[in-house]
Amino acid sequence: MSNSLRLFFAVEIPEEIKIDIETFNRSIDRQKWRPVRKEQLHITLAFLGEVPEDQLPRVIEAGKKIAAKTASFSVELADTGIFPESDEPRVLLINVASDTLAKMMNELKSELGPLADQKKVKPHLTVARRKGERARKEIRKVRGTWQAKEFLLFKSTLSENGPDYQVIEKFQLL
């Protein structure tokens, strides 16, 4: 049996935006939310989960195909939100406005077929995960805009300290 890799495609966040998000995270209820570490902040385009290692060339080829037809694009952070939208949210997020980003998410899922998680997801940036009981939405404005010029394929290794990410491939946009 071949080894598998836990993979996802993502857009990285510029350092100055990460600093703003760190400031935001200092204001949230730390009893209820565990902030995402600054170096792990990203916008997921497609989550693949465990993929057989021998499928890695197919995954990289899918990324190259999408990159070859996608121009760099503007990414804009909007208001905070929660997921799921219920009394028991698990994720505190910042909504992201970008038609191109949403299109890329759909195209990657389509190109990867059953290798990618096919759940419908809105573009967002996870900033914290529920830690305690009865976490609630933290309503804040977090603003930031940047030009995305690339996206990446990451390998994620789970550990007791949370996930560690390693870049497998970078895909330059037009």
Image (spheres, rainbow, N blue to C red):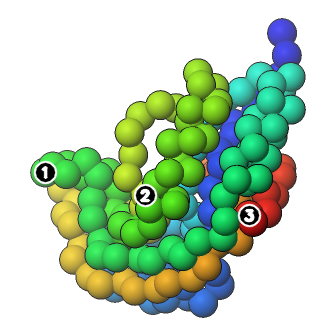
What kind of residue is marked 2? Pro
Label 1 neighbour load within 10 Å: few <14, some 14-19, many 20+: few
Q: Which mark is residue 123?
A: 2
What kind of residue is marked 3? Leu
According to the image, label 3 marks what residue?
Answer: 173
| Residue 94 pos. (x, y %) | 37, 69
Instruction: Please identify the quarter of the rendering in which residue 65 is found.
Output: top right
Residue under the image location 86 percent in, 32 percent down: 57
Q: Is residue 11 above or below residue 103?
A: below
Q: CA distance from mark 2 to mark 3?
A: 18 Å
Q: CA distance from mark 1 to mark 3?
A: 40 Å
Q: Is residue 67 above or below residue 108?
A: below
Is 25 left, or right, of 133 in this rendering? right
Label 3 neighbour load within 10 Å: few <14, some 14-19, many 20+: some
Q: Earlier in the sequence, mark 2 or mark 3?
A: 2
Q: Circle 1 sits in a helix, a strand or a loop, which is it?
A: loop
Residue under the image location 22 percent in, 77 percent down: 139
Residue under the image location 56 percent in, 51 percent down: 104
Farthest residue, direction top:
1
Residue under the image location 61 percent in, 41 percent down: 108
Q: Which mark's residue is nearer the viewer, 1 or 3? A: 3
Of the 4 image quadrants, the one containing the C terminus is bottom right
